[in-house]
């Protein structure tokens, strides 16, 4: 990367470093990197239209629209009313504590639903195997062991649900308070 002494280019470079890091981080959490770059770009803007996003990121309008919808699913981008404009405007969540709360509670709740449902469906099948008088003892024994293993995961999902509730309500911040803003420069 070529660094320029031009302050405007340096400002863009500083923003691009953060946008890239956000894109990479969101990729770690299962969000397409280009959608992460979109979120990072939106952080530095008051609001943006799909056309502005497309122009800055050089992506198609349908890709921008799909990316915005994905970010809206996590409640980290919202549509904003802009008087006098016929275009939709969107704004990114700039408070990273709210971002964390919105993003992870939705991810965790999805994990809970998907996996707890799978456990319950599997246990129903295993119960039939265990109670079937025509099934050999080795298969019954393995079914019982598998059932115990699966049922043993349910407390994790209950805990994750409680953690999600505490994060969503803000109760978690009693135990893990937000740090004071000591890094602001005057």
Image (spheres, rainbow, N blue to C red):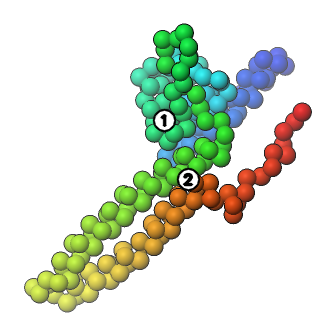
In the figure, 166 relative to 88: above or below? below
Instruction: Give the class, few, some or many, for how many residues have Cα within 10 Å of label 1's Cα (few <14, many ≥20).
Output: some
Q: x and y percent of residue 53 in the render?
A: 55, 21
Disc 2 vs disc 1: Cβ atoms closer than 8 Å?
no
Q: Which mark is residue 57?
A: none
- Residue drawn at (73%, 23%), measured in percent from left and top? 12
- Going by the image, does 114 lie left or right of 128? right
Q: x and y percent of residue 151 in the render?
A: 37, 76
Q: Which mark is residue 168?
A: 2
According to the picture, the residue beneath numbered tag 1 turns out to be 72
- Residue drawn at (36%, 74%), measured in percent from left and top? 150
Quarter assignment of residue 82: top right
Camera-side mark, 2 or 1: 2
Please name whichever residue, 166 or 90, is drawn nearer the observer in this view of the structure: 166
In the figure, 154 relative to 73: above or below? below
Earlier sequence position, callout 2 versus callout 1: 1
Please name whichever residue, 4 or 184, is drawn nearer the observer in this view of the structure: 184
- Residue drawn at (37%, 62%), measured in percent from left and top? 115
Residue 180 shows up from this direction: yes
- Going by the image, does 142 lie left or right of 162? left
Name the image quarter holding the C terminus: top right
Quarter assignment of residue 146: bottom left
Instruction: Give the class, few, some or many, for how many residues have Cα within 10 Å of label 2's Cα (few <14, many ≥20).
Output: some
- Residue drawn at (51%, 39%), measured in percent from left and top? 75
In the figure, 175 relative to 147: above or below? above
Please name whichever residue, 180 or 142, is drawn nearer the observer in this view of the structure: 180
């Amino acid at each position: 990367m070529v660094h320029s002494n031009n302050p405007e280019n340096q400002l863009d470079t500083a923003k691009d470093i953060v946008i890239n890091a956000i894109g990479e981080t969101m990729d770690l959490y299962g969000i397409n990197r280009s959608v992460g770059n979109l979120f990072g770009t939106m952080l530095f803007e008051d609001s943006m239209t799909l056309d502005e996003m497309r122009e800055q990121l050089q992506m198609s309008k349908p890709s921008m629209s799909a990316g915005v919808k994905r970010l809206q699913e996590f409640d980290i981008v919202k549509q904003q009313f802009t008087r006098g404009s016929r275009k939709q405007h969107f704004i990114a969540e700039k408070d990273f504590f709210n971002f964390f709360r919105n993003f992870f509670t939705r991810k965790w709740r999805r994990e809970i639903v998907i996996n707890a449902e799978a456990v319950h469906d599997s246990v129903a099948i295993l119960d039939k195997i265990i109670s079937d008088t025509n099934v050999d003892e080795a298969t019954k024994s393995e079914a019982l062991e598998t059932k115990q293993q699966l049922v043993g995961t349910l407390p994790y999902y209950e805990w994750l649900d409680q953690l999600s509730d505490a994060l969503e309500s803000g109760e978690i911040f009693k135990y893990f308070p937000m740090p004071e803003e000591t890094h602001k420069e005057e």
